[in-house]
Amino acid sequence: MVDITPADAIPPAEVAEVELYHPHGWWTKYVFSQDAKVIAIQYSVTATAIGMVALVLSWLMRLQLGFPGTFDFITPEAYYQFITMHGMIMVIYLLTALFLGGFGNYLIPLMVGARDMVFPYVNMLSYWIYLLAVLVLVSSFFAPGGPTGAGWTLYPPQAIMTGTPGGQDWGIILMLVSLILFIIGFTMGGLNYVVTVLQGRTRGMTLMRLPLTVWGIFTATVMALLAFPALFVACVMMLFDRVLGTSFFMPAIVEMGEQLQRGGGSPILFQHLFWFFGHPEVYIVALPAFGIVSDLISTHARKNIFGYRMMVWAIIGIGALSFVVWAHHMYVSGMHPYFGFFFATTTLIIAIPTAIKVYNWVLTLWRGDIHLTIPMLFALAFIVTFVNGGLTGLFLGNVVVDVPLSDTMFVVAHFHMVMGVAPILVIFGAIYHWYPKVTGRMLNETLGQFHFWVTFLGAYLIFFPMHYLGLMGVPRRYNELTDMTVMTESAQHLNSFISIMAFIVGFAQIVFLFNLIWSIRHGREAGGNPWRATTLEWQTPQTPPAHGNFGKDLPIVYRWAYDYSVPGAKEDFIPQNVPGSFGLSKEPA
Amino acid sequence: MTETTLTHSGQTEPRPAGWQGIAADWSSDQRAFKNVSWGKAMMWIFLLSDTFVFGCFLLSYMTARMSTRVPWPNPSEVFALRIGGSDIPLILIAIMTFVLISSSGTMAMAVNFGYRRDRRKTAILMLLTAVLGATFVGMQAFEWTKLITEGVRPWGNPWGAAQFGSSFFMITGFHGTHVTIGVIFLVIVARKVWRGDYDTGRPGFFTSRKGHYENVEIMGLYWHFVDLVWVFIFAFFYLW
């Protein structure tokens, strides 16, 4: 703040700047690597691989919904298993892992000007435990009885009872063990990300000079470290309920006409624990997306981000508020009206900081030199999608509106827009943006255009009609809708249309994967800074950055991350590590 | 946005007052916490996260205890020991608590001698802490055995609400696991101190990084935390 020129270096008390673990051979360089960049790629590849499984599961669900009665192998049990695994994989094993484990690992050390994460060994363990969690999850597909079909929220008592797929088999046990492993692994990585941002920055890098990407990932990680404990506890307790026969979440209950030896537990307690994690989780996924999209917009509109300081406070505010809104997921469970009032109020208050962010993105674009590159297209698509999804969130935040809509396709449409499509669009944008840094080559532009337009328009064609279906009263979670009065012929046609769109959008993702692999060898040479961006990761001496990131000397930061189109400067961008008194010198907004 | 101003005049601007000053301090150059090492910062943040874990466990237990319709067994009677012909309530728990709190004292002394680079005393005090910790776990094992022989199970017990046994085994088990892990690491760190690793700068086996006497303090942070958690378990589970 006050330290205008970077002061004397505060020597890292515990680790000499170059005291890094140096790999000895192929195994320690590419497999058991302690380099955050390699770990990031490992995280990303694993998350993408398991994400493809979830994509296929969504296809199977859409096959059943769009063309009911056509596919015999999709039994009701199988359908529930698809739903459960699709939701869990997408939210936790793909989005959380990719944003924090993937982008966090790659970008944090590079963007704050560090050689690596503060504790690379713990960071490596984090990935391997994550991989173990994924393998346990995958193994449930091959376990007797198949994976759990409890719904992605795993509500007890049904999650551990006969009749729910995997409830009395291996499914639910493997699911819970996998989640516990994931949380342990994530905690190891998360501690690294937080400490690296707080304590491991290079000279001149104040927190208020951090790129918003780092702010988003940092805040999300802090939230995750405080929210995942609730899920951890819920998983441990449910595991005991299932394995040891305790009754934490089990009320007195009759199963198949037989009174169980259970009683006195509270299923609502699980819901509280789950959503105390579950709602922050939405923002654990959204905040990194907010941060990344801010940087994409600023870079590709060649303009400083509007209201940087407000953006930072909005991120922190959203993070804090998201811990006091969880019960809006439980309106239909029933609660005292005053609680409903409280949680509706806090929920709607979140609209204020998020609206600030949306306005600031739009004002950043305002009169900018907008380059419609692929990352920019995805960033723009994100803004639109996030506003759309956010507006339906205002509907659902109100108790009286939520109760009739809660079990309909409207909710499916809402959270897929706001938490599924919007962050995924940012992930795509971010991959197109940083791929040149990771590989040294650009992704193919033509394939990128194809991928963007099919994904963007396709996502709308999938999820927009779902809002209408929901308002008509078409319920979610049902595998068979044909006999319902709400399922008119036209509604079923709409359902079939959604399914066809889902297949097309899914296909576009395979084109994207092809592009990712093909461009490693055949992409256009990118050079070190193809987007002419200011942040430190583009200023590395080598591309891709070598072990230790910055060569002999760490960069010194002289300015914030958004000096684009500065009047009087030679270029339309001034990297953060370029000294000089030109550039932004006043409060931006 | 004063911090993006580039005057290069060598002058320092006046420090902002009030909340702005606090924000300025937190976000200042390189490190948010100036004299805090990476390891110590990481331990504090981990403990914050772990607080939430224990908080959730305790809140869940309290929810179960308040909402159950079957009477909750009386802890004073359940945790009484028959000594010399009379039942003394909570006597074992009192001794366990005393032992664990004493171990915090020896840990604090170990930290002190660590900073004086007194290898011998530091290592001995850490081992003493570990012994006290192991004693605590041993007494906990005794307590578990006693309750199990009396018929307490995770799914039920002879005296009342089934959640009594479930919560008891889960919470004390989770805490006991923390103590056990602490004992293991105390022994590891004590060995390193004894061998002089922190004087010679011998790199760690896994991390290949040099250790410092500060590791004793970081170990101590964890140990005091586990101790503090026990105080809450004692208050909420045994005294309630």
Image (cartoon, rainbow, N blue to C red):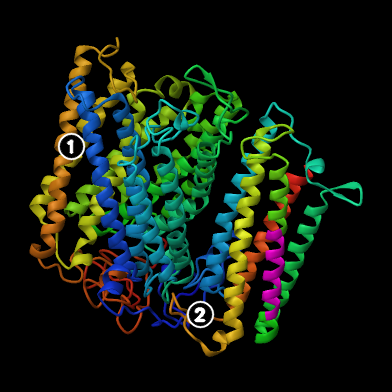
Whole-percent x, y for residue A4 in the image = 45, 75
Gap between marks 2 and 1 measured at Cα: 52 Å
The quadrant of the picture occupied by the C terminus of chain A is bottom left
Residue A150 left/right relative to A364: right
Residue that protrudes farthest toward the front in the picture: B149
Quadrant in the rendering for residue A43: bottom left
Q: Which residue is mark 2?
A: A14
Q: Which mark is residue B91?
A: none
Comparing B58 with A352, the one in front is: B58
> Disc 1 on helix, strand or loop?
helix
Q: Which mark is residue A457?
A: 1
Q: Is residue B134 magenta?
A: yes
Whole-percent x, y for residue A120 in the image = 40, 70
Whole-percent x, y for residue A291 in the image = 36, 54
Residue A156 left/right relative to A577: right
Quadrant in the rendering for residue B119: bottom right
Count up the numbered dots: 2
- Identify which amino acid the numbered label 1 is placed on: Leu
Residue span colored magenta? B124-138
- Identify which amino acid the numbered label 2 is placed on: Glu
Residue B188 left/right relative to A142: right
Parent chain of label 2: A
Q: Residue shown at 40%/44% (left/top)?
A: A174
Comparing B205 with A21, the one in front is: B205
Q: Main secondary structure of the magenta part?
A: helix
- Placement of A234 over or under A302, stated as above or below: above
